[in-house]
Image (spheres, rainbow, N blue to C red):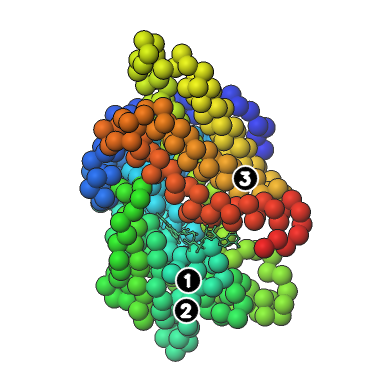
């Protein structure tokens, strides 16, 4: 684990990274944002362009994850999502599936599956992480998708329906969380990688959702019907699973969280950084507008009612970023999140993005409410940050339990 002291001074490499991504966000992502929001489709040309310049790639993601300070990934997310959140998620959905493999897989599985999930610039691939189900959203333990081992064939047979999966069905690679022993709740759950050759042979896309925001990001059901997977696709391997199940059955603590939670823990600062990017984008549009829009013979920013709003917006955005950077730094240094600092940053940044984007609409008045200006899209996009990867209520639950040591419901 890295041992780098916390500093708010960006290194030359980080400053360079931020500049490069900002240019890509401004020149490629932002100009495409309105079109793909209206089309409600995956922005393939933007993903391909990002792959060509090296942003949509395992190398890029790995470099940011392994930045000693922990800040590389959150700096990257903020810039890309400043460009546009829907397109940002289309670029980052694969990362969630890759994070699940890295949280639960063996070194061999990581080496084989993660690069394949990204493909190459000439042949781009996508990944999807499928945990949520119609009756198991916040309550991950209620998951019904079942995995049964067929010893004679050394295969697993999976059945169930996943919902709200980012890239679900259009992805080449799917990570599916399933239960092998429902009586054990979350401790009886395990993750599988489903390679492309099983699409249409046990794994199919169900309904594609029409959404309020992040509409350039594909969200759909994934239907799993007698999907037969060879053992090598069980993340972590059977031996480890049997050991874990035995210990859980004996009522002993397994010493690790269940698969979905392990994934979310690693991704929370990243998600918080995305929300910071959206909030900053809306704030900048509102600041510019307030300086140029004239009413009652003066720019509206000369009214305290507007200027103070902008002061609060800026302050909350900067506070969000600091919480995100703290959690990202702690995660990289291997510090334990004793006060659920990962959840704190996701909660605060998510709610800040919703609040800031709403203030931005207010500052733009009637224009803010139309699709001629980007802040209404940013407001719709921001709202998902109080819902996915753990709702705001669930983040508060996690924080409250951590600080109180009490099992709060
Ligand atoms: C656009 C989008 C993309 C998504 N992408 C993915 C993905 O890629 N992979 C994936 O697996 N999932 C994904 N999800 C699912 C997402 O993580 C869930 O929607 C989320 O976890 C909430 O679950 P739910 O929608 O079932 O809400 P519910 O759990 O039904 O919650 C409903 C309300 O009740 C509240 N609530 C529930 N329990 C409690 C409690 N104990 N205390 C207080 N309040 C509570 C919630 O906070 C919420 O306000 C995505 C969802 C969306 C909308």
Say what secondary structure mark 1 lies in: loop
Q: CA distance from mark 2 to mark 1?
A: 14 Å
Q: Which residue is mark 2?
A: 146
Q: Which mark is residue 21?
A: none
The structure residue drawn at horizontal position 36% and vertical position 47%, both measured from the top left corner, is: 214
Q: Which residue is mark 3?
A: 344
Q: CA distance from mark 2 to mark 3?
A: 33 Å
Q: Categorize mark 3 by other alpha carbons within 10 Å: few (<14), some (14-19), many (20+).
A: many
Q: Nearer the viewer, mark 2 or mark 3?
A: 3
Q: Nearer the viewer, mark 2 or mark 1?
A: 1
Q: Categorize mark 1 by other alpha carbons within 10 Å: few (<14), some (14-19), many (20+).
A: some
| Left or right of 100 in this view: 249 | right
Viewer-nearest residue: 3 or 187: 187
Viewer-nearest residue: 331 or 234: 331
> Of callouts 2 and 1, which one flags the residue occurring earlier in the amino acid sequence?
1
* Image location of residue 287, percent across then percent down: 42, 22
Q: Which residue is mark 1?
A: 135
Say what secondary structure mark 3 lies in: helix
Q: Is residue 336 visible?
A: no
> Of callouts 2 and 3, which one flags the residue occurring earlier in the amino acid sequence?
2
Viewer-nearest residue: 150 or 95: 95
Residue found at the far front of this picture: 296
| Left or right of 138 in this view: 213 | left
* Image location of residue 220, percent across then percent down: 34, 62
The structure residue drawn at horizontal position 58% and vertical position 54%, both measured from the top left corner, is: 393
């Amino acid at each position: 684990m890295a041992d780098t002291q916390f500093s708010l001074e960006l290194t030359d490499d980080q400053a360079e990274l931020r500049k490069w991504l900002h240019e890509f966000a401004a020149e490629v992502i932002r100009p495409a944002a309105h079109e793909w929001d209206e089309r409600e489709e995956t922005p393939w040309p933007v993903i391909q362009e990002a792959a060509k310049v090296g942003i949509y790639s395992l190398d890029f993601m790995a470099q940011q994850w392994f930045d000693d300070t922990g800040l590389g990934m959150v700096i990257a997310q903020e810039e890309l999502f400043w460009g546009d959140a829907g397109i940002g998620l289309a670029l980052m959905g694969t990362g969630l599936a890759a994070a699940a493999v890295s949280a639960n897989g063996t070194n061999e599985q990581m080496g084989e599956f993660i690069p394949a999930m990204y493909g190459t610039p000439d042949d781009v691939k996508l990944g999807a992480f499928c945990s949520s189900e119609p009756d198991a959203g916040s309550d991950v333990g209620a998951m019904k998708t079942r995995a049964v081992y067929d010893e004679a064939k050394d295969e697993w047979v999976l059945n169930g329906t996943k919902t709200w999966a980012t890239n679900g069905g259009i992805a080449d690679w799917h990570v599916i969380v399933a239960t092998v022993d429902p009586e054990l709740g979350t401790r009886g759950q395990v993750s599988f990688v489903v390679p492309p050759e099983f699409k249409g042979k046990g794994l199919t896309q169900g309904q594609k959702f029409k959404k309020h925001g992040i509409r350039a990001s594909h969200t759909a059901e994934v239907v799993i019907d007698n999907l037969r997977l060879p053992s090598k696709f069980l993340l972590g391997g059977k031996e480890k699973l049997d050991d874990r199940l035995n210990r859980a059955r004996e009522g002993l603590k397994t010493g690790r969280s269940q698969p979905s939670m392990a994934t979310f823990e690693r991704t929370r600062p990243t998600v918080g950084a995305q929300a910071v990017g959206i909030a900053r984008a809306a704030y900048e549009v509102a600041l510019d507008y307030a300086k140029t829009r004239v009413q009652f013979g003066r720019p509206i920013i000369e009214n305290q009612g507007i200027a103070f709003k902008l002061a609060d917006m800026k302050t909350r955005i900067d506070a969000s970023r600091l919480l995100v950077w703290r959690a990202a730094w702690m995660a990289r240094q291997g510090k334990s999140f004793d006060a659920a600092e990962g959840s704190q940053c996701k909660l605060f940044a998510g709610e800040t993005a919703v609040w800031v984007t709403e203030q931005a609409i207010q500052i733009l008045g009637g224009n803010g409410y139309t699709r001629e200006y980007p802040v209404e899209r940013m407001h719709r996009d921001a709202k998902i940050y109080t819902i996915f990867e753990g709702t705001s209520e669930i983040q508060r639950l996690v924080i409250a339990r951590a600080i109180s040591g009490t099992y709060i419901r």
